[in-house]
Image (spheres, rainbow, N blue to C red):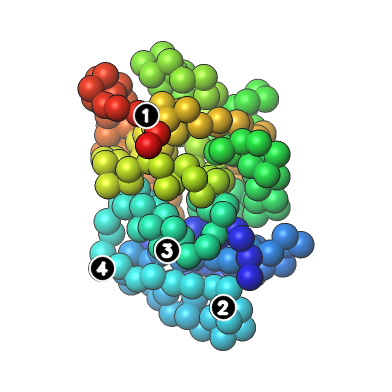
Amino acid sequence: MSDSLVIIPTYNEKENIEKIVRKVFSLTQPFHVLIIDDGSPDGTADIVKSLQSEYDGHLFIEERAGKQGLGTAYIYGFNWALQRDYQYIFEMDADFSHNPDDLSRLRDACVQGADVAVGSRYVKGVNVVNWPMGRVLMSYFASMYVRFITRINIQDATAGFKCYRRIVLETIPLNKIRFVGYAFQIEMKFTAIKFGFKVVEVPIIFTDRTEGTSKMSTKIFREAFLGVIQMKVNSWFRNYSRN
C-alpha cells in the first residue's frame, strides 16, 4: 500500500495520459494514481482502463458525465481519498506541465512539517518554460493581485501542483468550496491559511504542454479575477476555527 495519492483530472488527454501514468509509477517513492475523467470523447478513459491490469490496485479511474470543472473534479477526488487511508493527497496536471519528479519533493515538504506544499513557479524568480510572455505576465500579476486582495503571502497563488496532508482536507468543509476553474486553486490555499495550516512553496520549473489542448479560457480567468474579491468579503463572515 501507498500512503500517497496523485489525483489527475482529465479531459481529452489521450496524447499524454499513458506517459504521465507510467512516469509516476516509475518513481522510487510509491504513489497511487486516481484519474478523474470528465467524459473525454477522445478515449482518454479507455487508455487508463487498459493500463489498470498492469498497475492493479495502484491505478484508479472515476468517470463523470461531461465537463464539470477542475474544482469539482478535485473535490470528488479529495472525498474519494478521504474514504481511504491516504495521508498525502496530490493535485497534478496530466500534460507534463508539472514534472512528476517533483512529487517526492512536495511530499518531503509535508513530511517535514508543511500542511500544504505548493509547487511554485514564482518563489525563486519566474520559472516558466514555453509560455508566451503575455501569459507569463498575466499569471504573475494575477498572483500579485491575489496577494493584494487577500493578504496571503503566497507567490504563486494560482498554482495547481500541490500536496495536502490528510488533516487539511478533513478540516476544510469541501462542500463550501465554490469555485470550479483556476479560482479553485486560490480558494483552497486561502482557506487552508485561514484555518491556520502551514502552506509552503517549493520551487519548480513549469513547462507548458507540448501535446493536447489547454483548457484555459476567458471565462475561467474572469471567475478568478472577480471571485477573489467575493471570497475575501465572504471570509469576514465565516468561522475558521478548527473543531
Residue shown at the point (26%, 26%) measured from the top left: 238
Please state which of the two labelled residues, at mark 1 or mark 3, is closer to the viewer: 1
- Give the residue type at disc 4: Ala
Task: Compare marks 4 and 3 and give the one earlier in the sequence.
Answer: 4
Question: Residue at the spot x=28%, y=59% of the render?
Answer: 67
| Residue to which mark 3 is pinned | 83
Farthest right residue in view? 28
225 vs 30: above or below: above
Earlier in the chain: of badge 1 and badge 2, it is 2
Contact flag, marks 1 and 3 (Cβ < 8 Å): no
Whole-Å distance between the Cαs marked 2 and 3? 15 Å
Task: Looking at the image, tell me whether mark 2 or mark 3 is earlier in sequence order.
Answer: 2
Q: Amino acid at mark 2?
A: Gly
Report if residue 1 is visible in the image. yes
Badge 2 is on which residue?
57
Task: Describe residue 191's horizontal placement relative to residue 7 as left or right.
Answer: left
Crowdedness of circle 1 by 10 Å Cα count: few (<14), some, many (20+)? few
**Within-10-Å neighbours for mark 2: few <14, some 14–19, many 20+:** few
The residue pinned by badge 4 equals 65
Q: Which residue position holds label 1? A: 241
Mark 2 or 4, nearer chain start: 2
Q: Nearer the viewer, mark 1 or mark 4?
A: 1
**Horizontal and vertical percent for residue 115?**
56, 38
Q: Residue at point 60% right, 31% down?
A: 200
Marks 1/2: CA–CA distance:
37 Å
